[in-house]
Every structure is written in C-alpha cells, then in structure tokens.
C-alpha cells in the first residue's frame, strides 16, 4: 500500500486541495456516521475552531505548505503536551491541566505542516492494555465496537483505524503502540530508545518510554517517524545519531535477509488463528527470498516480570509530583499529608494505584534482591537480542499479540491483562526498534505481525515490513 500522507501533502502543496478542506472532511467524519466519536470515544478533546485555524495557517504559509506533512490531520495521545489543548493523561487528577509548551514531537509535526485534530484517549497515565482504565470512559475498537482497541494508545490506534486522522502519535513503555495497532489493524512503530525525544511527554517509566507513530500503512509510519526523530537538547536521553531516510529501502524487498523466528515467541496458549497468520506471513517472506531461521531467545520468560518490577519502581518516582500541591487537582485537607492523601486517593484510578503500590512495595523491601534481579534479567534479555544479531540474524519476526482483541468489559484479572504485552516487552527492555503490521484477521478482528531489528536499524525494519505489506495485498 503506497503512502497516503505524502500524496495528501503534495496535493496541499500544489494547491489542488486546501488544508482547511481536508481538515473539515476529517471533522465531518468525526461528527457523523455510525463510527462517530460518541460510539468509539477515541478522543478526549478536540477544538473545531482551533483546528480549522491551524489548517488556514498552513494554507497561508508557503513554508508550511511545503512541509512533509502539509495539511495532514494528526491525532496526539493525551499524555503528550500541547499548548493549545488540555493534557489530561486520562486521569481525574490531571483533568484541568494545560501545558505552557508543546512537546518536541508536537513542535516538529507543526513545523512540517501537520494539523493537530485532537487529543486521544488512553489508559490512565498510560497504564493498561485496553484503554478501559480511562477517567473519560473506554475507547471501542472501530473494527468491532464490542471489543477493546488495546492500550494504552488505544485512542490513537482507533482514531487512525476509523479514519478520523491520517496518522497519530502514541507512546509505549512495554508495547502500548504495537499492541493497539495489532488490535485495530493499523501500523504501529516503537523506535530505538533515544531516537525520538520524550521532552513534553508525561513520564511513566523513563528508561522505557518512547513516542511512536501509528499510521494506516508502512510508508506513512516511516514518514511520520522521519519528521519526529532526532536528538533534542531538551532531552538528555536522545542520542545524537544521524536520522537516515526511513523510506529509502522500502522497495528493496527481503531477498537475502536472514529473519529469525524465536521459539519462545510461539507460546503454548497462542490463538490458532494468530499462529496460522504468522505461518502464512513467514511463508510469504520466504517466497520473496528471505532466509527464515528458527532460533532461540532463551531468557524471554524473564522479560515480563523484569519489566513490571522496573516500570513500577520508575513510575513511583515519576508520579510523585502529582500531589495536589505541585501538579494535579487538589482536594483540601486539614494537614498537608491529608491534602496529598485525599488528592491522590480521589485523583488516581484503580490501576494506577495498583502499580504505585507494587512499586512502593519493591522500593521498601530491605532486601535488594528483587531490584537487582530485575536489572540483571533486563541485561540478559538484551544480551539475547545482541547474540542474535551477532549470529547473522538481520531481523526477527513474531506475532505482536498472542490473541486478537478481547471483548470490552471482559473483566480480566490484572495478570491476564499484563500478558497482552508478553510478546512486545522484550524489545522495550532491550531498547531496540520494533513494529506491528496487519497480517490477517479472524472473525473480523485484525491480527498483527511484529518485526524487530537491531538498534538504529529502522530502515531495514521498514524495508521488510513494506515487502510483507505488499505481499499481503
């Protein structure tokens, strides 16, 4: 599937269509039809007049009209700061917060001529895998309204899948871009850790969080990453490496590439339809000249528990600022301690509290074995990937999730919900790039396939993804 975004930007640049007309079409889709916002609940906020004003600014500026994203409607996950719209993190404690600045990724989108169409729903503070843990109500999957869109970037994935925006930004800590992309049948990318600035992103777990694009096809995702990538003086975790042309290799195919299929990413409980779709996708890659090699990532089982220990510890620190004094809605109390307790008790949702308590328990343990063990496990998981690249593997292919989207209100146990990330968390711990693309469907629900690459090798990953996308058409 060729890129829609580049064609739209070219039409705006040539004057064939105005940015204002394209944005009005997006709002018409948002406000009418059976997949309107009241049913899907993809957005927490959108400003019709402000967005039209943005589009008119693009039309009036020769510089913005020449941008790579001229007039392209982009949705922004509501934990990414924007100066012209609230940033709520889908939490009651943040319901009235307005940022005094744009996140770096938002500034870069605006400079490229993109138009922000709204802030999308998410699991509160990005903690969840279904977008049901939102103070603004759950988001529904546009492919089947009785099912979840995944999370935590479920609103962004749903907005793209429903056609409300051409693309969106999400964030992920363990898989919160790739998993909802798989559930909604769109493309979602996690870049190499340090490739994209986190400045202006409300932090969950700082050593894991990354901003990633969600789009309708591989080329659009590559173009969006092209715009937002690069070192940022405001974020010391970005790495000053050159940003290559992520679309340069899209037509090169997979002939000669060695693609590893790790045994540990084919769990016993995988849905048969997901397994079949992966087998078919692997067959298509082989037919096009890829060398398929079954291999092992032996410490995969350590990834999920290591992630939850590390993420819980880091979120305790990052969420400490939301106390009703420095940040967040205030509930008055007779003492400062009571003020903080009431503000947090009423402002945080159940899942956020659960994870804070988990992290607090780990931090208060006098025996550091769990903390040290989690760090060691992360190092072992990372070494598995490094060993694979050292043995001549170019890329890895797996399912993105072990099953399609589950039903809304399924009342899964927390552990069952966390298992939604079992196939995505390894790449997050290792800091490597990974992406999900649609590879099939079962009973109308999309199935995602995942590609993982060595650090900084996003062009190679996009190359294989484009070849597989083309083969599946």
Image: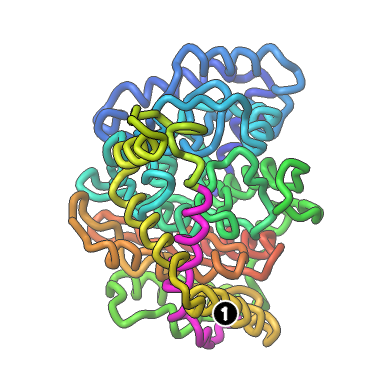
Q: Position of residue 181 (x, y in %)?
A: 43, 52
The residue that mark 1 highlights is 376
User: Does residue 209 appear in this view?
Assistant: yes
Q: Position of residue 132 (x, y in %)?
A: 28, 46
- When the figure is inspected, residue 80 is found, relative to residue 49, above or below; the finding is below
| Residue 320 is one of the magenta-drawn residues | no
Compared across the picture, whether 44 is left or right of 253 comes to left
Outermost front residue: 335
Identify the element where label 1 is drawn: helix
Front residue of 210/61: it is 210
Q: Quadrant of residue 227?
A: top right
Q: Quadrant of residue 233?
A: top right
Q: Which residue corresponds to the image point at 41% horizontal and 21% vertical from the top-left?
A: 27
> In the rendered view, how is the structure colored?
rainbow
- When the figure is inspected, residue 283 is found, relative to residue 190, above or below; the finding is below
User: Does residue 162 appear in this view?
Assistant: no
Front residue of 240/280: it is 240
User: Which span is picked out in magenta?
Assistant: 290-318
- When the figure is inspected, residue 361 is found, relative to residue 23, above or below; the finding is below
Compared across the picture, whether 397 is left or right of 447 comes to right
**Prevailing SS of the magenta stretch:** helix
């Amino acid at each position: 599937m060729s890129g829609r975004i580049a064609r739209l930007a070219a039409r705006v640049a040539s004057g064939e269509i105005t940015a204002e007309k394209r944005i009005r079409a997006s709002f018409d889709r948002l406000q009418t039809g059976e997949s309107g916002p009241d049913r899907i609940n993809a957005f927490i906020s959108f400003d019709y007049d402000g967005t039209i004003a943005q589009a008119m600014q693009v039309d009036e500026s020769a510089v913005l009209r020449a941008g790579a994203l001229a007039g392209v409607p982009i949705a922004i996950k509501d934990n990414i700061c924007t100066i012209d719209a609230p940033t709520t993190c889908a939490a009651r404690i943040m319901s009235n917060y307005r940022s005094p600045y744009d996140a770096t990724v938002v500034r870069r989108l605006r400079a490229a001529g993109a138009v922000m169409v709204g802030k999308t729903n998410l699991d509160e503070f990005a903690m969840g895998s279904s977008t049901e843990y939102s103070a603004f109500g759950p988001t529904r999957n546009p492919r089947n309204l009785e099912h979840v869109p995944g999370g935590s970037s479920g609103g962004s994935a749903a907005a793209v899948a429903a056609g409300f925006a051409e693309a969106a930004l999400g964030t992920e800590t363990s898989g919160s871009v790739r998993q909802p992309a798989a559930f909604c049948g769109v493309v979602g990318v996690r870049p190499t850790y340090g490739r994209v600035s986190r400045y202006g992103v409300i932090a969950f777990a700082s050593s894991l969080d990354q901003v990633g694009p969600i789009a309708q096809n591989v080329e659009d995702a590559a173009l969006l990453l092209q715009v937002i990538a690069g070192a940022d003086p405001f974020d010391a975790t970005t790495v000053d490496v050159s940003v290559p042309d992520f679309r340069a290799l899209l037509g090169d195919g997979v002939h000669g590439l060695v693609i590893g299929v790790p045994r540990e990413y084919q769990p016993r409980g995988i849905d048969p339809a997901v397994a079949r779709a992966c087998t078919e996708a692997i067959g298509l890659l082989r037919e096009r000249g890829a060398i398929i090699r079954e291999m092992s990532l032996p410490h995969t089982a350590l990834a999920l528990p290591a992630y939850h220990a590390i993420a819980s510890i880091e979120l305790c620190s990052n969420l400490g600022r939301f106390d009703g004094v420095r940040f967040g809605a205030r509930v008055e109390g007779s003492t400062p301690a009571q003020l903080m307790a009431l503000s947090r008790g009423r402002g945080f949702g159940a899942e956020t509290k659960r994870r804070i308590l988990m992290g607090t328990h780990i931090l208060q343990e006098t025996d550091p074995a769990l903390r040290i063990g989690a760090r060691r496990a992360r190092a072992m998981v990372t070494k598995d990937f490094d060993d694979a690249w050292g043995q001549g593997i170019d890329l890895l292919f797996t399912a993105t999730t072990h099953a399609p989207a589950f039903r809304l209100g399924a009342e899964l146990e927390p552990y069952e919900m966390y298992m939604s990330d079992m196939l995505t968390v390894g790449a997050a711990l290792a800091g490597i790039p990974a992406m999900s693309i649609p590879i099939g469907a079962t009973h109308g629900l999309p199935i995602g396939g995942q590609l993982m690459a060595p650090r900084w090798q996003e062009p190679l990953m996009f190359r294989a993804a484009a070849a597989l996308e083309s083969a599946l058409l």
